[in-house]
């Protein structure tokens, strides 16, 4: 019985971590449906489409090492 409780605690911590990462990446809280999809590993295409990365910064004109 202790093993079952231990596994539930691990899954709970895992979901909290995923929820935090989703929020950091998207700026919004995931729905319970989205959390279940993410935690189960299903439908990762929807997740990757919902996370948009900011554009890269333009290159520097001058090297930081040139004196």
Image (spheres, grey):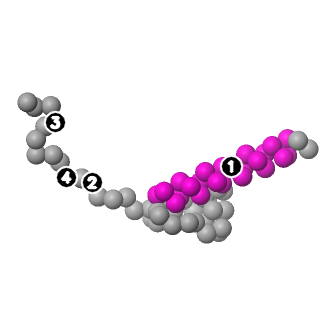
Q: Secondary structure at mark 4?
A: loop
Q: Is residue 27 magenta?
A: no
Q: Earlier in the sequence, mark 1 or mark 4?
A: 1
Residue situated in front as seen by the camera: 9 or 45: 9
Q: Earlier in the sequence, mark 3 or mark 4?
A: 4
Q: Is residue 18 magenta?
A: yes
Instruction: Provide the residue designation for mark 1.
Output: 13
State the CA–CA distance, disc 3 to disc 4: 15 Å
* Quarter occupied by the C terminus: top left
Q: Earlier in the sequence, mark 3 or mark 1?
A: 1
The residue carrying pointer 2 sits among few (fewer than 14), some (14 to 19) or many (20 or more) residues within 10 Å by Cα, namely: few
**Pointers 1 and 4 in contact (C-beta within 8 Å):** no
Q: Earlier in the sequence, mark 2 or mark 1?
A: 1
Instruction: Provide the residue designation for mark 3.
Output: 64
**Pointers 4 and 2 in contact (C-beta within 8 Å):** yes
For discs 3 and 4, the disc positioned in front in the rendered view: 3
**Pointers 2 and 1 in contact (C-beta within 8 Å):** no
State the CA–CA distance, disc 4 to disc 2: 6 Å
Q: In the image, which residues are magenta? A: 3-25
Instruction: Provide the residue designation for mark 2.
Output: 56
Q: Earlier in the sequence, mark 2 or mark 3?
A: 2
Q: Secondary structure at mark 1?
A: helix
């Amino acid at each position: 019985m202790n093993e079952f409780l231990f596994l539930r605690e691990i899954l709970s911590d895992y979901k909290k971590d995923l929820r935090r990462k989703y929020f950091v990446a998207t700026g919004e809280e995931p729905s319970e449906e989205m959390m279940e999809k993410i935690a189960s590993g299903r439908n990762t295409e929807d997740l990757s489409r919902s996370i948009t990365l900011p554009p890269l910064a333009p290159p520097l004109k001058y090297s930081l090492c040139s004196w």
